[in-house]
Image (cartoon, rainbow, N blue to C red):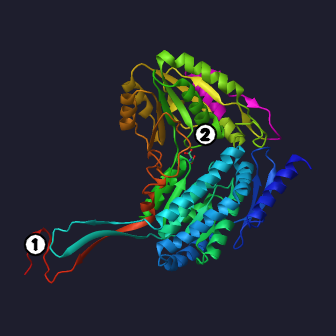
Amino acid sequence: MNATTDFRERATAALRRCGADPAGPAGPADGDLVVTTPIDGSEIGRIRSHSPAGSDAAITTAARTFETWRDVPAPVRGRTVRRLGELLVEHKADLAELVTLEAGKIPSEATGEVQEMIDICEFAVGLSRSISGRTMPSERPGHRLMETWHPLGVVGVISAFNFPVAVWSWNTAVALVCGDPVVWKPSETTPLTALACDALLRRAARESGAPDGLHHLLLGDHTVGEALVDDPRVALVSATGSVRMGRVVAPRVAARFGRCLLELGGNNGAIVTPSADLDLTVRAVVFAAAGTAGQRCTTLRRLIVHRSIADDLVDRLAKVYAGLRVGDPFEEGVLVGPLISSRAHEAMRTALDRAQHDGGVLVTGGDRVDGPGDGVYVSPALVRMPTQTDVVREETFAPILYVLTYDDLDEAIALHNAVPQGLSSSIFTLDQREAELFLARSDCGIANVNIGTSGAEIGGAFGGEKETGGGRESGSDSWKAYMRRATNTVNYSTELPLAQGVEFG
Ligand code: UN1
């Protein structure tokens, strides 16, 4: 059996074990979606895909299901998510295999992504018994003033190739306990993982007595996603992807007064101060910058290092970079898998050319590396830049780490914040004043001390400011985006005092 048939068979077998039809979803299908693996570029599936008519049918059923699901008590809704979590544990290896096949992640990271799904299910089950409003003091005697949270409606989820299952689960586990059915448009690049998740959730719904029609998968190109964006029955559009995509989605959802939760690009930076523990810093930086082949929205792309330690740190990083094994992610010892496409490689090439044109010096990496078949493999690049030029301010979705130097911390923080994106950030320091100042001043949604920018836990709210879009998903009180708030005033007296002391008649 050659590698190509092997990949196809492995994908088909994993799908079957998850209870999914490898031919794609039932219902109104319009075309074929050819699925390839970035590992060697070979075809691993051919599935039925939807047309915009399929979106309409899905939204109609989801909207109808909302009418019953909203009335199911939240702790009972939690049982469906608990069952989903159990099935994810059972099928962890199958899902991880599909993630590696479709997104090219090394097995440890693929398994970690599935763990992230399991974690959010646990979190959401807890939420199903703890979502709560507040009671505020009323200015009127015999009155109670409070706020209550109610299911919002259909949630549309648009997700990207790089976290093909975790981002879906952050949205879906939370939306379901909040009382909202979900319609999901995954990336066209990763429909197989989506088929597997959909099958597992449908099974969880069946087995926990939840209504049919709670979850719908839309496979197809952007026209399928556009229906979610424009349909007034979709109360919340939660979209993960590029800033370019966000610029299209946000005004269209706003035009119909819908709600948007955007998780767009990041251009994450870390500051390394003279007091930093450099051994720890090197390990953290390499994982954050080169892990997932630089294809996380939280990937570290800018390292802002104090001049006194810059040469030493760059030398150490260059040594580790030189030893990173790049190649087939299924191979033992490989830490950096393929880029998702040759287009990603072209973008990397162009960025490196621009950086060098701007006076940057390529310390190591940036080369094509041999790998199986037509897979696109590159060595992660480390580039020293004289200043933060335009190319450094842009997000290139590939493993490029730009190194800048600074002399005082205020300057470093200003440099750090001087990019349009605001997702994740870090400082490496053993000086508490420096750490606190950074936490106070970083303009990102995520700011860390002595850990890298990527690999956030689900318990915190995930998302960022500025061009990252402002949305928050996953933990903490992100659930509020999936519910509507009502302010309630209850008069339990026999009088009718008006607020602000108004007299009327
Ligand atoms: C993404 O790249 O879209 O913090 C999400 C992380 C992961 C999620 C990344 N937990 O890197």
Spot occupied by residue 62 in the image (x, y as percentages of width and height): 56, 74
Q: Any atom of ligand 1 within 8 Å of the CB at mark 1?
A: no
Which SS class for mark 2?
Answer: loop
Q: How crowded is mark 1: few (under 14 residues within 10 Å), some or many (20 or more)?
A: few
Could you tell me if residue 108 is visible in this image?
yes
The circle on residue 502 is 1
Spot occupied by residue 469 in the image (x, y as percentages of width and height): 46, 49
Q: Which of marks 2 and 1 is nearer the N terminus?
A: 2
Residue drawn at x 56%, y 17% is 312
Decide: is 464 above or below 199.
above
Could you tell me if residue 360 is visible in this image?
no
Mark-to-mark CA distance, 2 and 1: 59 Å
Which quadrant holds the C terminus? bottom left
The residue labelled by disc 2 is 397
Left or right: residue 295 compared with residue 23? left
Q: What stretch is highlighted in magenta?
A: 348-374
Left or right: residue 207 compared with residue 228? right
Inspect the image, locate mark 1, and give the three-letter code of the amino acid beneath it.
Answer: Val
Q: Which of these two is toward me, 261 or 255?
A: 261
Inspect the image, locate mark 2, and give the three-letter code of the amino acid beneath it.
Answer: Phe
